[in-house]
Amino acid sequence: MKSMNTSTTPTPPAELSAESPATTPAKAAYTPRSLLKQLQTQFPAFRDFLPLSIGIDKQVLAALPELDRKTMRAALGIHTGSLRYLKVMEKAKQRHDLDGKPGAAVTDEHRAHATQVLKERHKKEAERKKAERDAAAAAEAARVHAEKLSQLAAKFSRKG
């Protein structure tokens, strides 16, 4: 009869399988923002906010194969949705690869899309600022009203 090992000691690292997370490259080591910071330090196209080539994700994965595709796409979304990138894209004539070398032309449709996104953002920002101003004015009016009420209450409570 074989004896069963019922000890609760952890398995030593040498016994981990080849597919375990401890031995594979850390795909989840980056957050989208930390990955974007690395891309900006490593590649001129990201650092200078140049319009990126179509399919730049494949170039990034070829240069950094250890990256998690989902994290990389999220980082690209943050980058291409940034105000600075959209402003450059609005006036751009050419797209660039990772090294900053010019490639294909930026289409009128893509420039128009950047312009539209910027207009929508400016409109939302203006609406937000107006709402803040209106809320501040309402709060000030309420404060003044409460102050006047307390002054009236104090005035009439003295006479009684």
Image (cartoon, helix red, strand yellow):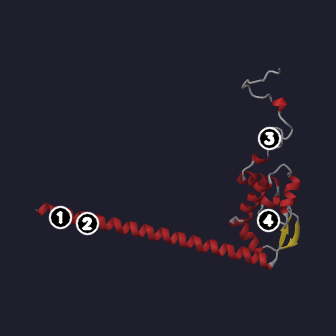
> Which mark is first along the chain, 4 or 2?
4
| Near-viewer residue (88 or 29) | 29
Proximity of marks 2 and 3: CB atoms separated by less than 8 Å: no
Q: Is residue 2 left or right of residue 142?
A: right
Q: Is residue 98 visible?
A: no
Is 57 displayed left or right of 119 in the figure? right
Quadrant containing the N terminus is top right
Which residue type does callout 1 highlight? Lys
Q: Residues within 10 Å of mark 1 (few under 14, many from 20)?
A: few
| Mark toward the viewer: 2 or 4 | 2
Whichever of callouts 1 and 4 sits on the residue coming sooner in the sequence is 4
Residue where numbered disc 2 is placed: 149
Q: Say which quarter of the image contains residue 43.
A: bottom right
Whole-number angstrom distance, CA of label 3 to CA of label 1: 76 Å
The residue indicated by pointer 4 is 50
- Please state the horizontal and vertical placement of residue 93, each as a whole percent of the image: 82, 74
Number of residues whose C-alpha sits closer than 10 Å to that of mark 2, classed few (under 14), some (14–19) or many (20 or more): few
Amino acid type for the residue under numbered disc 2: Leu
For the residues bearing labels 1 and 4, Cβ distance under 8 angstroms = no
- Mark 4 nearby-residue class (10 Å; few <14, some 14–19, many ≥20): many
Outermost residue toward the left in this view: 160
* Residue at which label 3 appears: 21
Label 4 element class: loop
